[in-house]
């Protein structure tokens, strides 16, 4: 009797339209979505950390002048062995391409970057206007508005400038990665070879972009080391150049720079930011400029007063240098 009943029950289930699939509640679906997003974010964070570590290691290896012909390939000298190992490591890390990967950052970071691109645009316009004022303080010219900045393969800052109406011929970029330079020189950006240079920013600013009179400079790097940033500042202001190589500096211009919390020595981010601002102030003073912090009076420079300086482990700082008349 039991067997017959069981068979009848099974036959009923098989022939009926009853849904016997496992029930998944909306709360369970939301939980699964959250777990997937968390795991995805975790993988992205790990990739970011790896990229930053690679960026820092490349900067450390560059200090050894590994491109020098002093590295002898056929010798048993211990120092040459060490340098050959460093060169091999450098070449291996470099072969991985640009450490900056915009796809690894979330929506909040994208909004943070967008807000600072807008600040860059506002400060460039403010400085350009100040550079062409008459004695009554009225702007008398619509002269070119040259700007220098760092950009990635996605051309985020380049796109923002073009959408804001900047002339493509007034945009100048340096990047040491061939794929990124190729992307910026291609459509939809179409930067020229003379404006988008393959090379480190500090070298390009010192040797090629010395006579352009940038009204704004945005050094939006992807690392936390102060050394490379200080090199860029010194190349921009060229305080260590020979007198015959002094750059053309306008009477008013803005400098923005970004540092991240990731740094080999573990020094606090704010301490490192202060290191950079002290260098800017020192070099600017030696050239006869006053340095003003944009954050002290953002409205004066046309910058959104709600602009956030920090987002998680990233800090972007803006200053304006004004010729002391």
Image: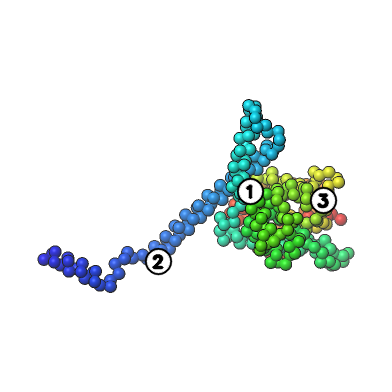
Q: Say what secondary structure mark 2 lies in.
A: helix
Q: CA distance from mark 1 to mark 2?
A: 41 Å
Label ID, residue 223: 1
Comparing 297 with 302, the one in front is: 302
Q: CA distance from mark 3 to mark 1?
A: 26 Å
Q: Is residue 194 above or below residue 266?
A: below
Query: Which of labels 2 and 3 is toward the front?
Result: 3
Q: CA distance from mark 2 to mark 3?
A: 63 Å
Label ID, residue 247: 3
Q: Earlier in the sequence, mark 2 or mark 3?
A: 2
Label ID, residue 197: none
Q: Residue at x 50, y 52 (%)?
A: 43
Q: Earlier in the sequence, mark 3 or mark 1?
A: 1
Q: Is residue 297 visible from the viewing direction of this image? A: no
Few, some or many C-alpha atoms within 10 Å of disc 3 (few <14, some 14-19, many ≥20)? many
Query: Which of labels 3 and 1 is toward the front?
Result: 3
- Quadrant for the C terminus, please: bottom right
Q: Residue at x 83, y 43 (%)?
A: 242
Q: Residue at x 30, y 69 (%)?
A: 19
Provide residue 56's location: percent of width, then percent of height.
62, 44
Q: Say what secondary structure mark 3 lies in.
A: loop
Provide residue 88's location: percent of width, then percent of height.
61, 38
Provide residue 14's location: percent of width, then percent of height.
24, 69
In the picture of the structure, the residue carrying the numbered disc 2 is 26
Q: Say what secondary structure mark 1 lies in.
A: loop
């Amino acid at each position: 009797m039991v067997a017959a009943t069981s068979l009848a029950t099974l036959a009923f289930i098989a022939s009926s339209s009853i849904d016997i699939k496992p029930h998944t509640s909306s709360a369970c679906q939301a939980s699964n979505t959250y777990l997937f997003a968390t795991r995805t974010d975790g993988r992205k964070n790990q990739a970011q950390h790896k990229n930053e570590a690679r960026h820092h290691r490349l900067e450390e290896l560059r200090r050894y002048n590994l491109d020098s012909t002093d590295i002898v390939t056929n010798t048993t000298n211990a120092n040459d062995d060490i340098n050959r190992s460093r060169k091999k490591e450098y070449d291996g890390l470099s072969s991985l391409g640009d450490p900056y990967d915009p796809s690894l950052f979330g929506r909040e970071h994208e909004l943070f970057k967008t807000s600072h691109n807008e600040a860059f645009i506002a400060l460039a316009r403010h400085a350009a206007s100040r550079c062409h004022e008459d004695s009554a303080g009225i702007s008398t010219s619509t002269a070119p508005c040259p700007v220098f900045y760092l950009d990635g393969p996605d051309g985020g800052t380049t796109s923002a400038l073009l959408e804001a109406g900047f002339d493509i011929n007034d945009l100048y970029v340096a990047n040491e990665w061939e794929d990124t330079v190729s992307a910026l020189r291609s459509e939809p950006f179409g930067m020229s070879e003379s404006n988008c240079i393959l090379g480190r920013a500090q070298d390009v600013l010192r040797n090629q972009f010395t006579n352009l009179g940038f009204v704004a400079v945005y050094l939006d790097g992807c690392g936390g080391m102060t050394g490379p940033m200080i090199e860029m500042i010194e190349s921009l202001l060229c305080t260590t150049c020979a007198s015959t190589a002094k750059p053309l500096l306008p009477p008013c211009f803005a400098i923005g720079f970004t540092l991240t919390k990731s740094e080999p020595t573990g020094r606090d981010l704010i301490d490192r930011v202060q290191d950079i601002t002290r260098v800017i102030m020192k070099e600017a003073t030696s050239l006869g400029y006053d340095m003003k912090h944009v954050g002290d009076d953002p409205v004066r420079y046309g910058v959104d007063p709600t602009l956030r300086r920090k987002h998680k482990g990233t800090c972007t700082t803006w200053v304006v240098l004004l010729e002391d008349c």
